Image (spheres, grey):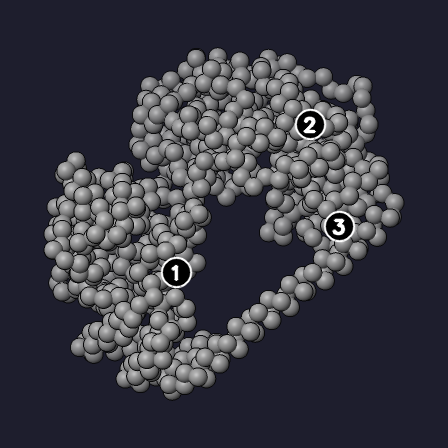
Amino acid sequence: MPRFSVIVPAFRVQAYLHACLDSVLNQSFKDFEVVVVDDCSPDTCGPIADEYAHRDPRVTALHLPRNAGLGPARNAGMERATGDYLIFLDGDDTLLPDALQTIADRLGATRDPDVLMYDYTRTYWSGRSVRNVLADRLAEHGPASFRLADRPELLQLLMVVWNKAYRRTFVEAEGFTFPPGYYEDTPWTYPVLMSAGSIAVLDAVCVSYRQRRRGNILSTTSEKHFDIFDQYDRVFAFVDARPELALWRPVLFRRMLDHFCAVYASRDRLPHPSRAAFFRRATASCRRYATPGAPAPRRARLRHGLVRLGARRTYRALAASRRIGDSLRRGTAALRRAVRGAVLQAHYRLQLRLPLRPRDAVFATGGDGGYAGEPAAIEAKARELVPGLRTAWICRPRHASTVPPATRTLAPGSFAYWSALARSTYLVNDGAFDRRLVKRRGQLLLQTHRGTPLKTVGTDLLDRPAAARSTDFEQLLRDVDRWDFALSANPHSTLVRERAYPSGYTTLEHGSPRNDVYHRTGPADVARLRETLAIPPGTTALLYAPTHRDYRRVQRPALDLERLVRVLGPQFVILDRAPVSGRTRTAHPRIIDVSGHPCLETLALASDALITDYASLMFAYVNLDRPVVLHLEDIEAYEAARGTYFDITAFPPGVVARSQDELFDIFATDHWRGSRSAQLRAAFLARFCPYDDGHAAERVVRRVFLGETDGLPLPVPPSARRTALPPQQHPAGARMSRG
């Protein structure tokens, strides 16, 4: 008996069925069967199902003699299912990687409830993914399992069959089946949830719900949408047959009214001549099942009341007036924004006529984020070395807490923001300032960049549309022409960026200020950082920090971290900073989610080794003289989409794995921290970190803010540098110099 039976009905989904079935068969969890039900589909769904059944014994292909609809197709699949749990997946949707393992783990943790509810993401044809906006209803707090009465808010979630796992013996004991017709999920999900003796939730995205441009059944104009009335008749008949469920009637009544109104409001579901008849049927159902005691939101009360009264003309007039009102509100809001924008620009033009403030400096990082990166390191050193300097940091309000108390925060687009841009003498950014910035005579703009470039940047992206996306290269060059200074960490960065960002600025090849912290942090500080990240004492922490993939719209992890921690054993933990779209990360006691941590330097200091791919973090991390492992499984695709400035496999900072199995072997054999790893790291450090000695920020501040050109601190040779040791130095087989 397999753990899961995944039932996949298929009708006119030939373009998506391969992806659907592959998403199941490629799961890391293997104890399942797949029942594909060909609902007499006129396309190639049947042959596709046969193809998969032929090559994988876990797949069963059923062929219905005539088209029966989604509900009967699922019933046919259930009759063949033998798994502990039933999982339904529509033929145009997919499971996310590791979804079954995540579901299995949660079932085990909650002692096999009757129903487990999990989350989904809507995936659009453009590749954009949006998580369910009511995801907070799935918070894993309180008892592991419960009844619906304990968490009635679960009824606010989308009432579909495919966001739940059902214990098969529970389904069979209750005799649940799907009815024919549209909206067949309605008389299944409500009775199942109301009857379940135990329900559990999983706060993780497990299903990618495809939003098709055309062809979705429920967006098809048809009188079959009248089936919704029969489906709610079935729901209320189920409740009436079980007196103990009477408490749910008010809630069901309100949900029914909401559902009727949603179908009626949709312009592409009901044929125009049928709309009046639909409204009459809705009124009849409301009068039949009217149940007091279910308070509706204020905005819905009038709408519900008009449906119950059968006042269709008034309902239409109300809907029209609301549309007009919404348009007026949007127009008023747009006018308000336009007026405020004009006033702000008038204020900015006035400020541009006032004298510069010679001791004012504005700092920012790309996207108006928190206090981090090269600008933060320079700002801190500037406050230390420049007498009377007043600094300000541009950031969104949610990041204001990251800014030191001595530094003023500026909200983007505010009056203070425009005043500071107009009158500050020093402007420092690792990205671009507002395109409306007017660079004044006497202002100095320092572009710090972000790390050392391995991947293609700037105008070199002109022939790489997948990576450039919507980059405005003319605006990019206008921004570059504002630069007075551009920071460079090494000769490689200088040569690349002077070509990729062509203009008349001065390059400051002084090192990377953000890396100074690696040479100024002691073991006690590292121990404290590890404690704040909940890294168990005595364990080896691996930081997994791959880069964004330009050729993928949806970011998915390239490495199976759960399998890796099993290979590594109990003395290892993983700090997971992989970019992931549309799902929560799998909970595991030895995988620590640090995706939202604001400071990459903290994570690097707290770790014992780095696993990455093409991320510029590798150029900074070697300053710690700790092992680096590169996982380059998709290097051909990455090179084709983004491009790199040199072959990282020919000159890596550590050992290279071209597959997951090879990476696991590297750790299993301890090759990751052997002598070869140390030799590669030392060569990489010598080439790319000649000025990263703990004094880079000082050199930059003295040159830009104090105007010093001579007597700047000379670079400290690598052999004499001090690096931050971990609290207990693990036998890494690598040099850990103290200087």
Secondary-structure class at tag 1: helix
Q: In the image shown, does 593 or 339 lie closer to the viewer?
A: 339
Of the numbered discs 2 and 3, the one sitting upstream in the chain is 3
Query: Would residue 460 be found to the left or right of residue 615 on screen?
Result: right
Residue 464 % position (x, y): 52, 31
Query: Would residue 339 be found to the left or right of residue 460 on screen?
Result: right
How many neighbours does mark 3 have within 10 angstroms: few (below 14), some (14-19), or many (20 or more)?
Answer: many
Q: Amino acid at mark 2?
A: Pro
How many labels sit on residues? 3
Query: Would residue 171 be found to the left or right of residue 554 on screen?
Result: left
Residue 33 % position (x, y): 17, 45
Q: In the image shown, does 443 or 279 lie closer to the viewer?
A: 279
How many neighbours does mark 1 have within 10 angstroms: few (below 14), some (14-19), or many (20 or more)?
Answer: some
Task: Name the residue tied to disc 1.
Answer: 137
Task: Name the residue tied to disc 3.
Answer: 418
Q: In the image shown, does 715 or 521 lie closer to the viewer?
A: 715
Camera sees residue 301: no
